[in-house]
Amino acid sequence: MENAGRNVADAVEAFVGGPSGGSAKVAIVAGGGNNGGDGFVVARHLALRNHPVTVFLVAPREKISGDAEINFNILLALSFDIRQGTDALAGELKTYDVIVDAVGGTGVRGELRGWMLEAVNQINQAARPVVAVDVPTGLDCDAGTPSGPCVRADLTVTFVTIKTGFKNPMSKEFTGIIKVADIGIPPMQVARLAAGSQ
């Protein structure tokens, strides 16, 4: 999770013009699973680089567990700017230079509902540049198509290897540019994973 988040932070910084491009105001929209946990790490790394960062936690607090909870608690200990819920989210997001979609990752299947659906709609309504963590929320990573509303990203930072669904030309509408990030998995294991996705 640490390697994934740091790689996304690097990609976000490059996307907004790099360290020499000055600070960028970044919104991290996070769910409660591992994708959200990656987002919490992204937030910390970008803040360390002097980018103003706000975390919008759209999942109920009790949904955060495991490594995601560890990283969330680090943000709490650092007195991070964390806001809860989806009410008027789009209006707030409009004031940011870039939005990081860390709502839901590869484990999301089928049509979105509840807070996840609302978060996706609000991100899209904000009409700001979006960087997706691993896969745009709502996109089936195997088929490369959504079952309903889906985040439309300008850049997707995916981990280990390109997802099978990204080979579907229709996925480009939602992924934007795709960057594959190394998160420390040995090359032989990456080759096995890639062979399994053929």
Image (cartoon, rainbow, N blue to C red):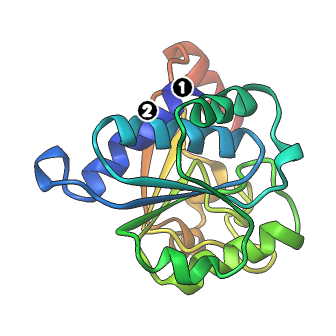
Instruction: Name the residue furthest left.
Output: 20
Q: Is any part of residue 114 visible from this angle?
A: yes
Q: CB under 8 Å between callouts 1 and 2?
A: yes
**Residue 195: mark:** none
Q: Residue at x 60, y 65 (%)?
A: 168
Q: Is residue 147 left or right of residue 8?
A: right
How far from the left and from the top, in percent, is residue 127? 47, 83
State the SS at label 2: helix
Q: Which residue is mark 1?
A: 2
Q: Is residue 166 above or below residue 160?
A: below
Q: Quadrant of the C terminus?
A: top right
Q: Is any part of residue 181 visible from this angle?
A: no
State the SS at label 1: helix
How far from the left and from the top, in percent, is residue 136? 61, 61
Q: Which residue is mark 2?
A: 6
The amino acid type of the residue labelled 1 equals: Glu
Q: Is residue 51 above or below residue 100?
A: above
Q: Is residue 179 left or right of residue 69?
A: left
Q: Nearer the viewer, residue 112 or 94?
A: 94
Q: Residue at x 40, y 70 (%)?
A: 96
